Image (cartoon, grey):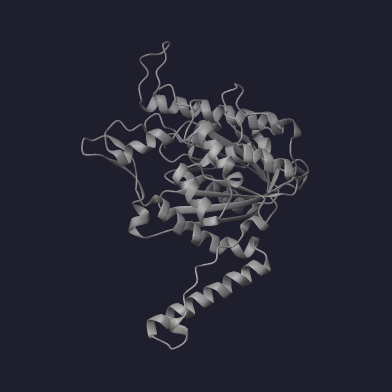
Amino acid sequence: GTGESTHWPPAILRSKEDPETQCNMAAAREEAKEVIFSLVRDVFKNTGVKPKAIDFLIINCSLFCPTPSLCALVCNEFCLRQDVRTYNLGGMGCSANVVSVDLAKQLLENRPGSRALVISTESISQSLYRGNDRGMLLQNTLFRCGGCALLLSSRRVDALRAKYKLLYSFRTQLSDTNSYNCVFQKEDAEGNSGVALSKDIVTVAGKAMRQNFIQLGPYILSIREQIVVVLNHFVVSLLTMAKKKGWPWLGSMEVPKGYTPNFSKTIDHFCIHAGGRAVIEGVKKNLKLTDRQVAPSVQTLFDWGNTSSSSIWYELDWIERFGNLQKGERILQIAFGSGFKCNSAVWVALRVNPKKRQVSLKQSATSAPPPAEAKADAAQQKPESGANENGQ
């Protein structure tokens, strides 16, 4: 679960200095400014890129979509060019970062030599549920403040200093009613608004992930693994049909279980959306991952809570600091969102900052140490899009 050092906005946890703060639009806008402005300043400072060099600005925030938009807020604060192309994505849930990255990839493909600034955050000042419905109270125990900013580029010169290269991105959108209602913003019987999380969320997430991995598999699995998957599917289908039709010999044979490919053979690190312990454990079981492989997600949930779409970048930052990330290793990001969606992205590390090793992102000593198993294993152990990332 979440630890004691996760972050609430001032509108929810009132301070002695400002006891009159309320959960209104002004408070939500101030929360957005505090998170987004600090992220953008850090990106420009760390990369040396000027605001005028940004060609595309993409911001995703599901629950807070004010007028003027968050993109307009950033353009006003940092004086971006008048011809900058802006995209404000709302209602896309916790998988929206991969949606934004996928959009940026397509924009960069169609305009070589350009740069895209992607910002992912979630505003919770107006989203705290104040009722007593158990299905809606769960959001209060999970969601916390946070965000990330990425600078992606299709300029060849930027490849010389990029931290990661985007290899693949895949998106899956389920359309059945149960999936649609799985994560639903609504009001309870007393008029209190909030987000209801269905008991079927883990099952629906597993279904969406299977569909997403059908797209992903041919690009990252070895030929041997793909052959085993195809043969297993053929045998299962044949024996299932034989039992239904009562075929002799074949009908008496036991139908084998579906084969789960070993993604660890081609993926070095996993960033599973820190949507809750049940979601992490469900993905761990479905992909047959070890405690070490899900440690980034578990630790991110403890340190930061569910920061929505930015959580997969907190996890990648944790891997860089405590997961022994090496140049050339592949990272798979898996995110789930309302609707219901499962989106994934595969990155390769181009360079790693050795100064980050074993240094917590938090300046205070409140972060719990990485799991012992993760430490032990760490000791053993289409245009080109460059990405510089920064999490707050």
In the rendered structure, the answer to whether residue 23 lies left or right of residue 344 reads left
- Residue located at (27% from left, 38% from top): 133
The spot of residue 64 in percent (x, y) is: 41, 36
The outermost residue toward the left is: 189
In the rendered structure, the answer to whether residue 382 lies left or right of residue 160 reads left
Residue 104 against residue 306 in the figure, above or below: below
- Tell me if residue 70 can be seen: yes
- Tell me if residue 83 can be seen: no
Marks counted in the figure total 0
Q: Quadrant of residue 118?
A: top right
The spot of residue 15 in percent (x, y) is: 42, 15
The spot of residue 114 in percent (x, y) is: 67, 46
Quadrant of the image for the C terminus? top right
The spot of residue 346 in percent (x, y) is: 63, 52
- Residue located at (52% from left, 77% from top): 235
Residue 310 against residue 210 in the figure, above or below: above
Residue 7 against residue 180 in the figure, above or below: above
The outermost residue toward the top is: 17
| Along the line of sight, the residue nearer the viewer: 206 or 173 | 206
